[in-house]
Image (cartoon, helix red, strand yellow):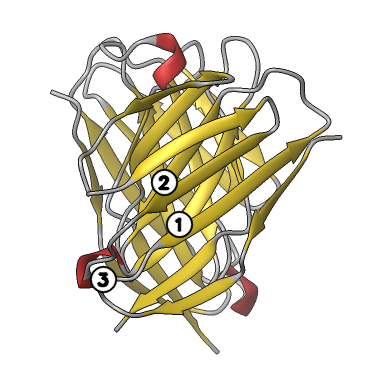
Amino acid sequence: AQTIHQWPVAEIKAVGSPLSLGCTIKGKSSPNLYWYWQATGGTLQQLFYSITVGQVESVVQLNLSASRPKDDQFILSTEKLLLSHSGFYLCAWRGQGWAETLYFGSGTRLTVL
Amino acid sequence: GEQVEQLPSILRVQEGSSASINCSYEDSASNYFPWYKQEPGENPKLIIDIRSNMERKQIQELIVLLDKKAKRFSLHITDTQPGDSAMYFCAASASRRNYNQGKLIFGQGTKLSIKP
């Protein structure tokens, strides 16, 4: 069975400080990986996706960047946080075949002060 | 377009009664429609989905209906319980996106509260 682990669980950071969030998936080789962002009470917005190591595509420009250093690892980062970066960050992977089911990690709650 | 409209945004129902959430989509080529339940502080979890070759699907108290002509689909929760209180998101596949990008477009969500 596939497991997806996100870290940290929560972060409180100052405006202008750097950020790094991580995601690891086990039990699935060469997964498609995704970063989603959710404002409090809001919907799910796709930020980045990656189909293979070293390859990341940006979907929305939010002064964030993503990298995939290993097949099972996806990193979200920025050098300077904005207040608008606060929210819930979810890593996800997609199932095989015709179904487009997304499976989400447990998420990271980010508060920027 | 790729929008998915979800209504209502807030829904309060009495315990034991039914709750219905409605979604509409724009892309006539959409062929996959999942529903996610998200409890406070938790990640969204898939609860039921339906593909375009079906009009109705039921898993226990969850019923999903799909009307392709009207480009609408809906979730019905029968005999609601306090544990059904949560945010619910519908989604539709978007044919114009590339396969690797993943094709789900999410609705705005419905906050369902079950009154005891």
* Kind of residue at disc 1: Tyr
> Relative to B29, is B111 above or below?
below
**From the viewer's perspective, is the residue at label 2 or at label 3 nearer?**
3
> Which residue does the image show at 47% across and 50% down from the upper left?
B76
Instruction: Using the image, name the chain to which the residue with label 2 belongs.
Output: A
Measuring from the top left, give residue B109's x and y in whole percent.
33, 56
Mark 2 lies on residue: A36
> Relative to A93, is A88 above or below?
below
User: Is any part of residue A112 visible from this angle?
Assistant: yes
Instruction: Using the image, name the chain to which the residue with label 3 belongs.
Output: A
Q: Are marks 1 and 2 in contact (CB under 8 Å)?
A: yes
Give A43 or A59, whichever is nearer the viewer. A59
Q: Specify whether A78 is left or right of B81.
A: left
Q: Label 1 crowding class (10 Å Cα cut-off): few <14, some 14-19, many 20+?
A: many
Element class at badge 1: strand
Quadrant for residue B116, please give it: bottom right
> Which residue does the image show at 62% across and 10% down from the upper left?
A97
Quadrant for residue A65, please give it: top left
Give A2 or B36, whichever is nearer the viewer. A2
Mark 1 lies on residue: A89
> Which residue does the image show at 50% across and 75% down from the upper left?
A11
Element class at badge 3: loop
* Kind of residue at disc 2: Tyr
* Kind of residue at disc 3: Gly
Quadrant for residue A45, please give it: top left
Q: Are marks 1 and 3 in contact (CB under 8 Å)?
A: no
Label 2, label 3: how far apart the Cα atoms are: 21 Å
Mark 3 lies on residue: A16
> Which residue does the image show at 32% across and 54% down from the upper left?
A43
